[in-house]
Image: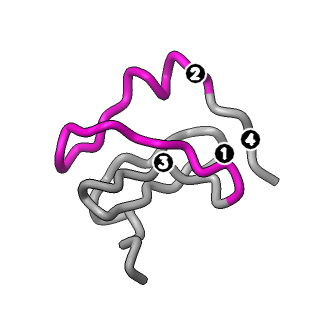
Amino acid sequence: MSEAIDRKLLEALVCPVTRGRLVWDREANELVCHNAGLAYPIQQGVPIMLPDAARRLDD
C-alpha cells in the first residue's frame, strides 16, 4: 500500500546527488530523480534520501 506524501515536503526535497527535482512514484512508493537515475525509497512515510539506499533506475 502506498502512502500519500505531503506536497510541501515533496517540493522541499531534492536529490542529494544532483540537487535536482524529485518525482513521486505512487505505485513503487519512491522518489525518483531521473537526472541521477536513482529512486529513493519511502519507508513508513519517511523518504530515505541516502544514495546508498537508492535503487538504480536501470536495475
Q: Is residue 32 above or below residue 46?
A: below
- Can you tell which mark lies on residue 27? none
Q: Position of residue 14 (x, y in %)?
A: 31, 35
Give the mark, 4 or 1, whose residue is nearer the N terminus. 4
Image quadrant in which the C terminus is located: bottom left
Residue identified by numbered label 3: 31
- Disc assigned to residue 7: 2
Q: Would you call the spot at circle 4 few (<14 residues within 10 Å), some (14-19), or many (20 or more)? A: few
Quadrant of the frame with the N terminus? bottom right
Q: Nearer the viewer, residue 8 or 58?
A: 58
**Where does the image place residue 27, in percent across and percent down from the top left?**
71, 57
Task: Tell me the mark number nearer the camera, choosing from 4 and 3.
Answer: 3
Q: CA distance from mark 3 to mark 2?
A: 12 Å
Residue at x 40% of width, y 41% of height? 22
Residue found 67% across the figure and 48% down from its top: 26
Q: Position of residue 42 (x, y in %)?
A: 56, 49
> Horizontal placement of 14 versus 2: left or right?
left
Disc marking residue 44: 1
